[in-house]
Amino acid sequence: MSLDKLVSKYITSADQVFSEIKIVEGYAGFSIDDVRRVLELAKAYLQDAKYYRDEGKLEVSLASVAYCEGLLDALKMLGMVRFEWSRKKEEEKSGEKSGR
């Protein structure tokens, strides 16, 4: 897969997450405002990834979307948000079809 296609795939996946992400209410230790601040930072990295992709700076774009994904994964691992990556959904669908 070309770098351009890979970057676009990751950007599309992150966009999908932002369309369905849910903040977990009542998470101990952090306020919802704290979670929202991290989500805004992740969105900013995603916007950077789009900008650099459009400018043809694919390596910088890939790094930016990777930062976005890292922040989202960290929030998810800490139980602060709920979402599924589209790549995981696709794998589960293909696994179901093959009988796994």
Image (cartoon, rainbow, N blue to C red):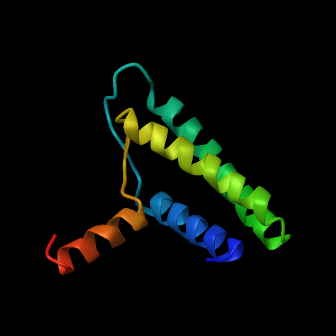
Q: Nearer the viewer, residue 92 or 74?
A: 92
In which quadrant of the rendered image does the N terminus lie?
bottom right
Q: Nearer the viewer, residue 48 or 97?
A: 97
Q: Position of residue 5 (x, y in %)?
A: 64, 77
Q: Nearer the viewer, residue 37 or 58?
A: 58
Q: Position of residue 36 (x, y in %)?
A: 53, 39
Residue at horizontal 68 percent and vertical 50 percent from the top: 44
Q: Looking at the image, how many numbered discs can be counted on the residues?
A: 0
In which quadrant of the rendered image does the C terminus lie?
bottom left
Residue at horizontal 49 percent and vertical 35 percent from the top: 35
State which quadrant residue 93 falls in: bottom left
State which quadrant residue 95 falls in: bottom left
Answer left or right for 2 relative to 34. Answer: right
Answer left or right for 96 relative to 89. Answer: left
Q: Position of residue 12 (x, y in %)?
A: 55, 70
User: In the displayed structure, would residue 45 be above or below residue 12?
Assistant: above
**Direction left: furthest residue:** 99
State which quadrant residue 55 falls in: bottom right
User: In the displayed structure, would residue 29 be above or below residue 100?
Assistant: above
Q: Position of residue 96 (x, y in %)?
A: 18, 74
